[in-house]
Structures are given as C-alpha cells and as structure tokens.
Image: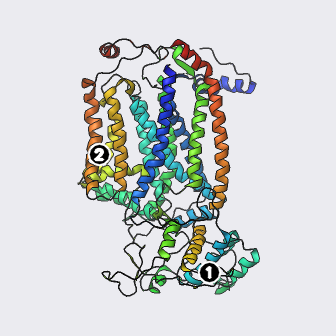
C-alpha cells in the first residue's frame, strides 16, 4: 500500500513523528468495506454517536446536579426550569438513553440475523455484549439520579436481587447500598459510577472497533470479501450513507425530545422519592422490561436472578452455540423463521415485563422465557444438523449461485 | 439486480422499524398505566404547535390562588415565572408582596418580610407533617409537577376536579372521605373544591366547575412544563433543519453511489 501523501506541512511534520493522520486515513478513509452493506449496518455508527451525545449532555448535566437525597430532585427541577436550555439538555439525555438502547438492540439483532458473531468475529461480538452489560449498569444507575419514586423503588428492587445469593447475599446488598437501605450513600456512589462507566464503555468501544477493523464488516450475504472488487473505501461511500442514516435517526430523536419528551418515561418519577410510600406498580425503564419479565417468570428468587443474568450470559457463548458455518440468514431458511420468532419473543417479554405478575401474564412469561433459552441453548446447536442451507454465492461482486449445500458447507469446514 | 433487490428489502425493513417504534411502545406504556380512562379535552397546549392560552392561564392562577392554595403548595414555581402568563414586573411584584416569607435580617434575627418576585410560591404549610395534620391525615400534594406526575396529565386533573358524585349505595364512604369517580379507589380525602361561581373571573367568563377545572389545569400544566412553548417552537425549526439535511444527504448519497450501482447492474 502506498503511503498517503499529506500536502499540509504541519500535518506532514506531525505524521512523520506520530502517524495519527496515516492511521485515520487508513481506518476512516481507505478502510475497505464490503460494498453490499444495507441500512442495518448504519446502527454501529449511530450507537457511537448516541454514546458521544450521552457523554456530552451528561457532563453538562453533572455541572448542575447535586447527588444528595435532599437536593437531587430539586436540582433536576432547577435544570428543567432555571438553567438556560437545561430542559433541552436533560430531555436529550433522558430520551438519548432510550434511543441508545433502540439503536443497540437493532445493532445486536442485525448481528444475530447475519451471523456477524461467527469466526473470526467472536471477540468482536463478545466485546459488544460487554458493552451492552456496561450500558445496562450505567442506565440503571442513571435512572436513580433524579431521585423520583421510580428511581428509588427501582433501585431498591434491583439491588435487592443480590440478596438472593446464598450466604453472603445480605452482606453484599448492604455493601452495595453503603448502608441498610437505598439512601444518600447509595445515591452518591451511583452518581460516581454513572459518571465513570461511560468512559469505560468508550474504552471497550475502542477495542470493539479494533476487533472490527481486523477483518472488516460482515455483510448481508455473510461470505468473506474475496478481493478489492468486493469492497469500497469507507469514505465517501459509507460516510455519506452514515450521514443519511444519522439524519433519519436525529429527526426521530428530535421528534421525541421536542414533542414527546416524557413518552418513554414513567409519570411517577416526577414525584420525589419517598421511602414510606410504595408505588402501585414498580416498573423499570422499557429497555429492561424483557429482562424483568424473565426475572419474574421464575418462581424462585435466586433462580430468577440466575436466569436474568443467564439471558445475557448465553450471548457471550453464542459464537460457540451456533455450529452452522453459514453466516447469513438469507441462506438459512429455517433459522430465518426462528430469528423472527425470537424477535417476537423479545417483544412479548417486554410487554409482559410491563404487566403485573399475575394470572395469564405469569404463564406467558414462563413460555416466553423458556423459548428464549430454547432458542439459544437448543435450537442454535442443533439446527445445522437439520437445516438444508441454500447455495452460497461465489463472491460479493459475482452473485452467481453455484454448488450445493454440501459443497458450500464442506468447503467452509475444510477451511477450518 | 442484486443491489436492486437489496434496496427494496431495505425500504421494507426501515418501514418495519418505524412501525415498531411508533406502535409497539405506546402499547407498552398504555399497558403500564391504570385502567381508568379520562375524558379527552381539547387543550390549547396539545399538539406540536400548541401554546398555553394566556387568558385561561391567568384565570387558572386565580383559581389556584383562591381555591387550591389554602392546602396545596407550588414550591418549584417562582413569582417571577408569572411573567410568562403575560403579567408585567409591577403586577408580579404586587402579587408576590401579598405573601410573607421567613427570612433572616442583618442582625441574624428571624423576620417575616413580604415575598419578592425572586421567591418561590409560599407553601401553605411549613412541612409535610403539618400539611397532613391540617387535613385529617390526608397529604395535599404539591402541585408544581402534578400534571407531569399523573398518567392522563391535564385530562386526569380535569376529570378529578369535576368527578365528584354521590356515592353509589353499596359504597361505604367513611368520615373525611369523598366519592370521586376518577380517583384510584374512588375515595379521596379532598372535598369537592369547585362549585358554580366559586370564583369571580375578572374577564367576565362564567365560572362553571368545568371552566374552572379547565383553567386551573391549564395553569398547572404550565407550572409542570414551563418550557413547553419554547420546546415546541425550537422543535419545529430543528425538525425542519434535519429534514433538509436528511434529504440533501440522501441525494448526495445517490450521486456518490450512482457509478457503483450502474456497474453492479451491468455485471448481474
């Protein structure tokens, strides 16, 4: 590869000693990207932009926020009422969390549909799941900070989960709280952690990108790039496509921030936290509802906690659960159907998480939970033995169909 | 050929996402709310262009002042904020001066002085316990965020204020409780606050309970969301800007990708 020629003498001088411009030119400009990516590949960059938006608005908010049980609620209201455009910053941050999760969930389901977790991208996927976990922890602690009723009771319910751990559970909960109930020390440490964890996420995102750039993006047909005829330089082809996607994303985001800012929140969180009054229904933020449904589906407390964390844990080992050498669902007719069943299952779990844990909802939660684990633990490993995949194209630029299932898959197996 | 089919599918997928976003989430949030539904009113501040009806806000302030403020505080709103209702500095000052607040003078002595524009609305009770004790154990909530903190918002408030009925014969109403068809459990500690001509409006509007409920709900909606008018106004400009940006970037994308797409068509 020829070294890029920078015209600007200052850039040249710096680049000779510290080749950051060469690096950026290589990774953001020439970076070869499969030419057949569809709009689902926009969501990675959107997630990155959402993260940066959250960090910037969060830093500004922290300048006006007071992490104390007596002042937290009022300091947030002061931001909403008296800080210049404070309402804008806070509504961006509040809705930004929801949009971040929407984008990341779509990004994850895209990975599932097109088999982006398969060799050689296992670590890329695992880092992604780690980011999801960190995001969940950060979002949970952030929701506590306004110190409304849902903040307080959500924090109480979720931290109490750790009491299910045998023997040391109670001590762990006391240690997490920094006292004998969710109180000022809990709020303080949550603020501290909510501030620092996003920067940990940035670190893992950088690793995620390093892992991504090692082999480049997967693509809708899921076969490896065979040469330069299959790729395009990232700039301008994907920078402009990402910009277009960003435009749509920001339009929807702005619609929520400016016209329905409290739509995805809970009205009870505009009531100041009161340890003496329990709300009628304690519901977490919508993005936790599927996990909350799994938690409540299991009749045993410890079991519920294990299954809830298990629902994330199975994602970590997913690259080894799925034995099929074919990545993209486009060539896996049965897998494709089950993929959409999984999507529906997750929506169903989300719906059930918002429902009271009684009657038919409990039964449905159990069925939906059972399906979730069936999908990952049984279906994924067994499907390759049953499924007859469609013939794979030879390359991205030559979508000529050739060979049969056996030829394609045995070829893929031989490579290992 | 290959790209063509891809593009069609993408459009379909994008529609799906938008569909899911707008139709699945409302279901979830509705489901999380209470089963009671409230009659829908036509609020001046609803819709993306909505603004608060100034005359209604001012009447609402009068209702709050004469009817509600005996028990309910408005602690997050400052007197200076009333300028947003169309009052001038002098009017706000005079309004504030009617109330007195505790302060400390230069000698460190506790004094009572007339409230200033910069003061927050003076609450009727010094603390929650006093508020409870003064109302037979029922706590009259502060109204600063009442519209935002109840599902149904202003419609809920309107329904509640006009929802006092004679209790059905099978319902036992204990002393100090009142029957309200829109309150959770139907038994509320607040006696019916609004009666025909309970206040006399300066602008001659007939003070029916429904009218007063509407006015005070408009006023309290503003107290909950004083930024609403700014928010919607800025929102429209932002959305317009983003739509232009999106459309321009779409055509720029089409142009940049044109040679790639035509090559792909030739080969397939």
Q: CA distance from mark 1 to mark 2?
A: 57 Å
Relative to A275, say whether B126 is above or below: below
| Residue A228 on image: x %, y % | 53, 15
> Residue B185 got which mark?
none
The answer to whether residue B54 shows anywhere in this view is yes
- Label 2 Cα crowd, 10 Å radius (few <14 / some 14-19 / many 20+): many
Q: Is residue A338 left or right of residue A256?
A: left
Looking at the image, is A413 positioned above or below residue A318? above
Q: Determine which quarter of the picture holds residue A385.
A: top left
Q: Is residue A29 left or right of residue A123?
A: right
**Residue B220 image offset from top left, x and y in percent:** 57, 71
* Circle 1 residues within 10 Å: few <14, some 14–19, many ≥20: few
Quarter in which the C terminus of chain A is drawn:
top left
| SS class, disc 1 | loop
Decide if residue A71 is on the left or right side of residue B204.
left
Frontmost residue, A410 versus A309: A410
Q: Is residue A137 visible?
A: no
- Residue at 54% over, 76% down: B210
Residue A46 image point, x, y percent: 54, 38
* Disc 2: which residue: A368
**Comparing marks 1 and 2, which lies closer to the viewer?**
1
| Chain of the residue where label 1 is placed in the rendered structure | B
Q: How many marks?
A: 2
Quadrant in the picture for the N terminus of chain A: top right
Q: Quadrant of residue B103?
A: bottom right
Q: Residue at x 54, y 66 (%)?
A: B41
Q: Which residue is mark 1?
A: B206
């Amino acid at each position: 590869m020829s070294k890029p020629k920078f015209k600007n003498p200052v850039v040249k001088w710096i680049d000779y000693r510290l080749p950051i411009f060469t690096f950026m030119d290589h990774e953001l400009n020439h970076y070869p990207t499969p030419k057949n990516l569809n709009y689902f590949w926009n969501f990675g960059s959107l997630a990155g932009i959402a993260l940066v938006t959250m960090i910037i608005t969060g830093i500004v908010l922290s300048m006006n926020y007071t992490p104390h049980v007596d002042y937290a609620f009022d300091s947030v209201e002061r931001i909403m009422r008296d800080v210049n455009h404070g309402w804008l910053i806070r509504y961006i941050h509040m809705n930004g969390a929801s949009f971040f999760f929407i984008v990341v969930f779509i990004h994850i389901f895209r990975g599932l549909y097109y088999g982006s977790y398969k060799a050689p991208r296992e670590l890329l996927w695992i880092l992604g799941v780690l980011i999801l976990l960190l995001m969940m922890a950060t979002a949970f602690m952030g929701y506590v900070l306004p110190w409304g009723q849902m903040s307080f009771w959500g924090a109480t319910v979720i931290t109490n989960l750790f009491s299910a751990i045998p023997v040391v559970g109670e001590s762990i909960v006391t240690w997490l709280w920094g006292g004998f109930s969710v109180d000022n020390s809990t709020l303080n440490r949550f603020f501290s952690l909510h501030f620092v964890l996003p920067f940990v996420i940035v670190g893992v995102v950088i690793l995620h990108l390093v892992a991504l750039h090692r082999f480049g993006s997967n693509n809708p047909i899921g076969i490896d790039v065979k040469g330069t005829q299959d790729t395009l330089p990232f700039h301008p082809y994907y920078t402009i496509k990402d910009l277009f996607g960003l435009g749509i994303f920001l339009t929807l985001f702005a619609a929520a921030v400016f016209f329905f800012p409290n739509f995805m929140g809970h009205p009870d969180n505009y009531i100041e936290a009161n340890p003496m009054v329990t709300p009628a229904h304690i519901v977490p933020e919508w993005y936790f509802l599927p996990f909350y449904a799994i938690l409540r589906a299991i009749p045993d407390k410890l079991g519920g906690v294990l299954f809830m964390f298990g629902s994330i844990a199975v994602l970590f080992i997913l690259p080894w659960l799925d034995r099929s050498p074919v990545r993209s669902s486009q060539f896996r007719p049965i897998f494709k159907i089950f993929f959409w069943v999984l999507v529906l299952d997750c929506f169903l779990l989300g719906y059930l998480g918002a429902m009271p844990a009684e009657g038919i909802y409990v039964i449905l939660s159990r069925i939906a939970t059972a399906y979730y684990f069936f999908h990952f633990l049984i279906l994924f490993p067994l499907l390759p033995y049953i499924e007859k995949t469609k013939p794979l194209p030879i390359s991205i630029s030559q979508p000529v169909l050739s060979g049969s299932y056996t030829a394609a898959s045995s070829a893929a197996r031989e490579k290992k | 050929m290959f790209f063509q089919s891809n593009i069609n599918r993408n459009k379909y997928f994008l529609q799906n996402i938008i569909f899911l976003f707008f139709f699945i989430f409302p279901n979830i949030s509705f489901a999380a709310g209470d089963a009671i539904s409230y009659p829908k009113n036509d609020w001046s501040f609803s819709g993306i262009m909505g603004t608060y009806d100034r005359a209604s806000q001012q009447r609402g302030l009068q209702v709050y002042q004469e009817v509600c403020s005996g028990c309910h505080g408005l602690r997050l709103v400052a007197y200076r904020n009333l300028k947003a209702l169309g009052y001038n500095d002098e009017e706000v000052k005079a309004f504030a001066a009617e109330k007195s607040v505790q302060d400390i003078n230069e000698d460190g002595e506790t004094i009572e002085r007339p409230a200033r524009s910069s003061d927050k609305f003076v609450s009727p009770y010094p603390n929650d316990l006093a508020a409870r004790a003064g109302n037979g154990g029922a706590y009259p909530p502060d109204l600063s965020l009442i519209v935002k903190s109840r599902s149904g918002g202003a419609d809920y408030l309107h329904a509640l204020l006009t929802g006092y009925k004679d209790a059905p014969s099978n319902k036992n109403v204990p002393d100090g409780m009142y029957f309200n068809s829109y309150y959770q459990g139907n038994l509320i500690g607040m006696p019916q606050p609004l009666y025909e001509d309970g206040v006399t409006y300066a602008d001659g509007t007939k003070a029916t309970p429904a009218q007063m409920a509407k006015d005070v709900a408009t006023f309290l909606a503003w107290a909950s969301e004083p930024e609403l008018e700014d928010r919607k106004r800025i929102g429209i400009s932002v959305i317009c800007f983003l739509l232009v940006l999106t459309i321009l970037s779409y055509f720029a994308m089409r142009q940049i990708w044109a040679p790639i797409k035509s090559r792909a068509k030739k080969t397939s």
